[in-house]
Image (cartoon, rainbow, N blue to C red):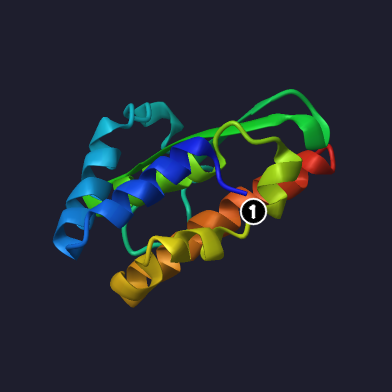
């Protein structure tokens, strides 16, 4: 259950056979993201478990399981900022209920990221997914 934006990334990855080109594409996705305001880079939005500094600020339109999910994100590392852009493509615009059903690691596995990221980056990516899932769970419960 991937969004059209994520499917576009997957198609581009299929087209780019060289991993250096894929890394460059991920970095470009990160560069294209609007910057996150410094005021939002707080301990409450910081994602623990990442080697780089990472912030995710959830944005919900509506209430409960039908609320539409979006988020702002940023990192001090360009490749991680790109991974945030990939996660944004995976989740933005889905309902909170749909976010809860996304198997992010399987979807990201389609890109081969699990095989080509360092263990630190993989752990950070899992921490970002966990944060998004936690926010979706809380929103679905009306918290």
**Residue 41 vs residue 20, the one in the foreground:** 20
Q: Quadrant of residue 60?
A: top right
Residue at 76% over, 45% down: 138
Q: Label 1's element?
A: loop
Q: Position of residue 3 (x, y in %)?
A: 54, 40
- Residue situated furthest front in the rendering: 15
**81 to the left or right of 126:** left
The picture places residue 78, in percent across and down from the top left corner, at: 23, 48
Residue beneath the point at 56% across and 46% down: 2
- Residue 90 placed where, x, y %? 51, 45
On screen, residue 74 above or below 127: above
The image quadrant that residue 112 belongs to is bottom left
**Residue tagged 1:** 102
Q: Quadrant of the C terminus?
A: top right
Query: Looking at the image, can residue 78 be seen?
Result: yes
Q: Is residue 28 left or right of residue 63?
A: left
Relative depth, front residue between 45 and 63: 63
Q: Determine whether, in the image, residue 133 is placed left or right of residue 126.
A: right
Q: Is residue 49 visible?
A: no
At 43% from the left and 70% from the top, the residue drawn is 123
Q: How many marks?
A: 1
Mark 1 is surrounded, within 10 Å at the Cα level, by few (under 14), some (14 to 19) or many (20 or more) other residues, namely some
**Residue name at image x 37 percent, y 30 percent:** 36
* Above or below for 130 versus 41: below
Q: Can you give x and y, in whole percent of width and height, for residue 49 in the image?
A: 45, 65
């Amino acid at each position: 259950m991937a969004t059209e934006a994520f499917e576009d990334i997957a198609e581009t990855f299929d087209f780019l056979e060289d991993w250096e080109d894929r890394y460059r594409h991920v970095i470009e996705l990160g560069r294209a993201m609007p910057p996150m305001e410094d005021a939002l880079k707080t301990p409450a939005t910081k994602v623990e478990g990442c080697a780089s500094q990472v912030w995710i600020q959830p944005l919900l339109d509506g209430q409960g399981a039908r609320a539409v999910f979006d988020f702002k994100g940023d990192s001090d590392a360009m490749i991680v900022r790109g991974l945030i852009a990939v996660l944004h493509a995976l989740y933005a615009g889905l309902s909170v209920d749909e976010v809860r059903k996304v198997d992010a690691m399987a979807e990201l596995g389609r890109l081969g990221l699990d095989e080509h990221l360092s263990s630190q980056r993989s752990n950070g990516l899992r921490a970002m997914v966990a944060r998004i899932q936690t926010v979706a769970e809380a929103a679905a419960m009306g918290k």
